[in-house]
Amino acid sequence: MDNWLDSLLSQNKIFTADTLFMYWDGFVATVQLSVISLLVGLLLAVVLAVLRSTRKPILSWPIYLFCYVFRGTPLLIQLYIIYYGITYVDGIQETFWWEWFKNPFYPALLAFTLNTCAYTTEILYGAISETDHRELEAARAYGMSWWTSMHRVVLPGAIRRSLPAYANEVVLLLQSTSIASVITIIDITGAAQNTYSRHYAPFEAFIFAACLYLVITFTILYGFRRLESRLLAYTRPRQ
Amino acid sequence: MLDLHGYGPSILGGAWLTIQVALLSLLLAVVLGLAGALAKLSHNAWLRGIATFYTTVIRGVPDMVLMLLIFFGAQILANDLAGWINRNFGTRLYFDINAFVAGVATIGFIFGAYMAETFRGAYMSVPKGQLEAAVAYGMNGWQVFRRVLFPQMMRFALPGIGNNWAVLLKTTALVSVIGLADMVRLAKEASGAVHEPFKFFIPVAAIYLLITFVSELVIRYLTRKYSSGVVRGSQHG
């Protein structure tokens, strides 16, 4: 086994152990950026979607505007504004934040988090507004308060209904993280760009990266399909 | 008034380039999408297989990776081709891959995959009796498509086309990475020169929002146009 691997690696000029380690580091960076921004973005989105569904203009308007702006402009612009802009925020260089934000990883994380938060808020808000009014009436008839009916009746249903759209958002965010490479982060795409410029081999470098993304994408889709079949079991016709 | 240090006109030029890239990619995407939808609906297993591979792989790979692959890959292929011609015919050719063409080709190719799904769904929503009636009137294949299928298909396809267009417009920002002077790249250069990133990126973001807003109006107009003859609020068909 080891000999086979050794001979394969020694025959190959591009995919040396060095290159493979770089892709591995890139893979880790891509997964870290995606997972952290998705988790934080989702938590924020649940709060924002609930606040927006209260239909109090002072709450729902700013949230609507936030979603509109972040969904209507390219993520690349958002990344540039945060990455280049943060340096010019007065006094930030003297605070502890600067320790974080001078590293391109954290500005990228912030941009991806806000972006996925905007899309997820829209998905969840849509699902909350589609709640069957009879469910709400039943909850009220049981004497549930707004908060009790929200977290016992509305949110569990809304989160289930948003699963298919959210799976889509997860895949799109994973792919969007590939633009982190333009601000010098070595994610999968960054590793591919380095490999390309070292060996002048675009096909090998980028197709290998594409395959890595495909593997992650299919894993995510498979995971969501399992989750949907468990959580949405009650919507299937009776056997 | 907004002081853009004299970069205003050049950024407006970049906005025009963005619109050109977006519209040409849309055109290519619609053509590829119709072809892809036809292939997916055909009885030929090979055509169906190729179309399914196309729509699956494109949607699983980031736009950025495809853009770099096509831009740098096409340059290598062009160099190989020029080298082969030069060896055999003693010429001194050199092909330079144009970033504009590469950008439009990539974005069109990506969104062709999304359009194929949209058109496939729209085709299946047109009642088959409509097509049979058209054939019974003696129309040929093209006439059936132009007079009966396309106008009805568009009604079902428009919401999907509108979504795809909104995403496509934002994807054009990636052409700045392969060296095209669209408004994102110009804003980046200008903000680097005068050290004021917010001053340039925020107006550019606003231009994207403006284009999106205008597009929504156009889609709304088209939806009304292609829904004429449909009674609102009831489900016929």
Image (cartoon, coloured by chain):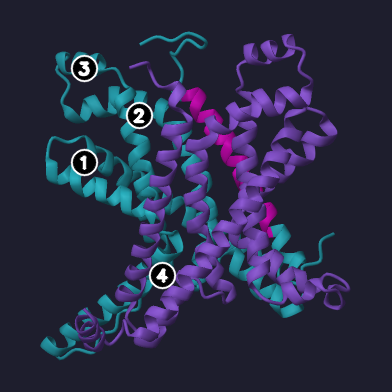
Chain colours: A purple, B cyan
* Mark sitting earlier along the chain (3/4): 4
Q: Which of B141 and A96 is in front in this view?
A: A96
Residue B221 belongs to magenta span: yes
* Mark sitting earlier along the chain (1/3): 1
Residue B51 belongs to magenta span: no
Task: Please indicate whether residue A135 sits to the left or right of residue B111 in the image.
Answer: right
Query: Whole-Å distance between the Cαs marked 4 and 2?
Result: 32 Å
Q: Which label number is shown at residue B122?
A: 2
Q: In which quarter of the image is the C terminus of chain B?
A: top left
Instruction: Please name the residue shown 15% across and 91% down the image.
Output: B90
- The relative height of residue B144 versus residue B114 in the rendered view (above or below) is above
Instruction: State which chain disc 1 sits on.
Output: B
Query: Whole-Å distance between the Cαs marked 3 and 4?
Result: 46 Å
- The relative height of residue A38 versus residue A155 in the rendered view (above or below) is below
User: Mark 4 touching mark 2, by CB under 8 A?
Assistant: no
Q: Which of marks 1 and 3 is in front?
A: 1
Q: Name the residue under label 4.
A: B68
The answer as to whether the residues below labels 3 and 4 share one chain is yes
Please provide the residue range marked out in magenta.
B204-225
Q: How crowded is mark 3: few (under 14 residues within 10 Å), some or many (20 or more)?
A: some
Q: Name the residue under label 3.
A: B134
Query: Whole-Å distance between the Cαs marked 1 and 3?
Result: 22 Å
Instruction: Please name the residue shown 65% across and 71% down the image.
Output: B188
* Mark sitting earlier along the chain (3/2): 2
Q: Name the residue under label 1.
A: B39
Residue B192 placement: quadrant: bottom right
Instruction: State which chain disc 3 sits on.
Output: B
